[in-house]
Image: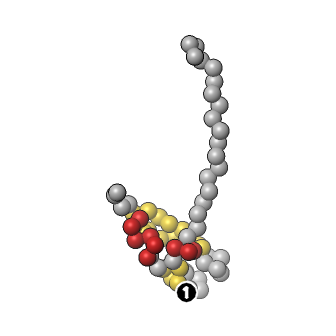
Amino acid sequence: MKSTLKNHTYQCKCGALTKELVWDKELPTAKFKCIECGKVLNSDNLLTISKAQVTSIRTPTKNR
């Protein structure tokens, strides 16, 4: 599997958001400092954004 460089967002307990570029294979071991308070952020602080599921509508077509 190819490892890609992606932009990940980390959220500190103080509420600050930190954006860092991290390789996929190094994601569990990556550690960064918070911009505002200086605490160490790791994969536990990774912010996940959930996307809404959209149901598809099947339109009637000819010969179906």
Give the crowd class for mark 1: few <14, some 14-19, many >=20 residues within 10 Å: few
- 58 vs 42, left or right, is right
What quarter of the picture does the C terminus occupy?
top right
Residue shown at the point (64%, 42%) measured from the top left:
54
Q: In which quarter of the image is residue 15?
A: bottom right
Q: Which amino acid does label 1 sit on?
A: Gly
Residue drawn at the location 47% of the way across and 79% of the way down: 31
Q: Residue at x 34, y 58 (%)?
A: 2
Q: Which of 37 and 40 is in front in this view?
A: 40
Q: Is residue 42 left or right of residue 22?
A: right
Question: Residue 59, percent across and down?
Answer: 63, 24
> Which secondary structure lies at badge 1?
loop
Q: Toward which corner of the image does residue 18 lie, by quadrant?
A: bottom right
Instruction: Tell me: residue 28, above or below residue 34.
Output: above
Residue found at the far bottom of this picture: 38
Residue situated in front as seen by the camera: 38 or 23: 23
State whether residue 33 is above or below residue 57. Answer: below
Depicted 45 relative to depicted 54: above or below: below
Q: Along the horizontal axis of the image, is 48 left or right of 21?
A: right
Residue sticking out furthest to the top? 63
Which residue corresponds to mark 1? 38
What residue is drawn where x is 51% and y is 77%? 42
- Looking at the picture, does residue 42 appear above or below residue 63? below
Quadrant of the snapshot with the N terminus: bottom left
Point out residue 51 in the picture as x, y percentages from the top left corner.
Answer: 61, 52
Residue 9 image-quadrant placement: bottom right
Q: Nearer the viewer, residue 43 or 11?
A: 43
- Horizontal and vertical percent position of residue 14: 65, 81
The reply to whether residue 18 is visible in this rendering is no
Across and down, in percent, residue 40 comes to 52, 84
Residue 59 at least partly seen: yes
